Image (cartoon, helix red, strand yellow):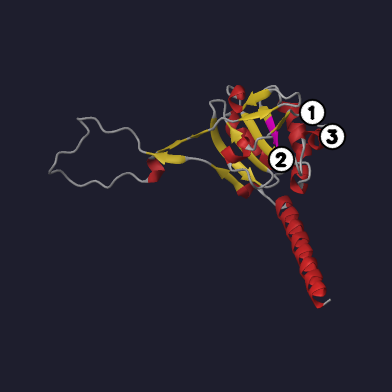
Amino acid sequence: MKNKNTLLVIVLVFVLLLGGAYVLYDRLGKEVTAEQMIVHSTPVSTAEPTEEEALPENGPTVEPESAEHEEPEDILALDFHVYDKAGNTVHLSDFFGKPIVLNFWASWCGPCQSEMPDFNEKYAELGGDVHFVMVNMTDGRRETVETASAFIEKNSYDFPVFYDTSGEAAATYGAYSLPTSFFINSEGHVIAQAVGAIDAATLQRGIDMIEN
């Protein structure tokens, strides 16, 4: 009897911890601000000096240029494959040539739900000029094509939805925290990303970065 009571207490504590973790994740996701947008720029060396510009061996010493004078290099967006609702294979590279807003989401994710109206509104406004690639984390257990599709239909969202049933897309972009968004320019380079729910202003900020 004593062992049963001990086991019951352990189970109750575990349930309370899980509930607290979920509430904390949901709250933190909704508090994401523009300052949490990560802008990707990798400093690289500028062009090598010509023979005329090179200093003689015994000439004065010159300190190397600081990173402020170096040109940023965009990060190449890695390709992956997902599926549309009909089961057709779709690659991220299919969308290169126009700016891309890449978003990883799930229907059970509260922060994902909170940002989706803004994504749908921007898609209605800019869908002809910017690709919105909304990738559902379809693990086959907590999320299925059916549950995700029902959620989209229930909320009358019009943006394109794709299903990551193999987990390849999430693994390629390290999208293990939902929602996560990436902003990719028309040349296929990742310019910025945001982890957690973003508001309309932050979404527009990311789009501005890839439209220019």
Furthest toward the left, the residue is: 58
Q: Which residue is mark 3?
A: 150
For the point 85% across and 35% down, the residue is 155
Furthest toward the front, the residue is: 1
Hey, what amino acid is under mark 2?
A: Asp
**SS class, disc 1:** loop
| Crowdedness near tag 2: few (<14), some (14–19) or many (≥20) residues, C-alpha within 10 Å | some
User: Which numbered tag is attached to residue 158?
Assistant: 1
Question: Mark 2 and mark 3 in contact (Cβ < 8 Å)?
Answer: no
Mark 2 or 1, nearer chain start: 2
Furthest toward the right, the residue is: 154
| Crowdedness near tag 1: few (<14), some (14–19) or many (≥20) residues, C-alpha within 10 Å | some
Q: Which quadrant does the N terminus fall into?
A: bottom right
Question: Mark 1 and mark 2 in contact (Cβ < 8 Å)?
Answer: no
Mark 1 or 3, nearer chain start: 3
Q: Position of residue 124 (x, y in %)?
A: 76, 27
**SS class, disc 3:** helix
| Residue 182 falls in image quadrant | top right
Hey, what amino acid is under mark 3?
A: Ala
User: Which numbered tag is attached to residue 139?
Assistant: 2
For the point 57% across and 38% down, the residue is 172
Q: Position of residue 133 (x, y in %)?
A: 68, 30
- Left or right of 34 on screen, residue 7: right
Vertical placement of residue 193 versus 16, above or below: above
Magenta range is: 133-138
| Residue 175 falls in image quadrant | top right
Mark 2 against mark 1, which lies toward the viewer? 2
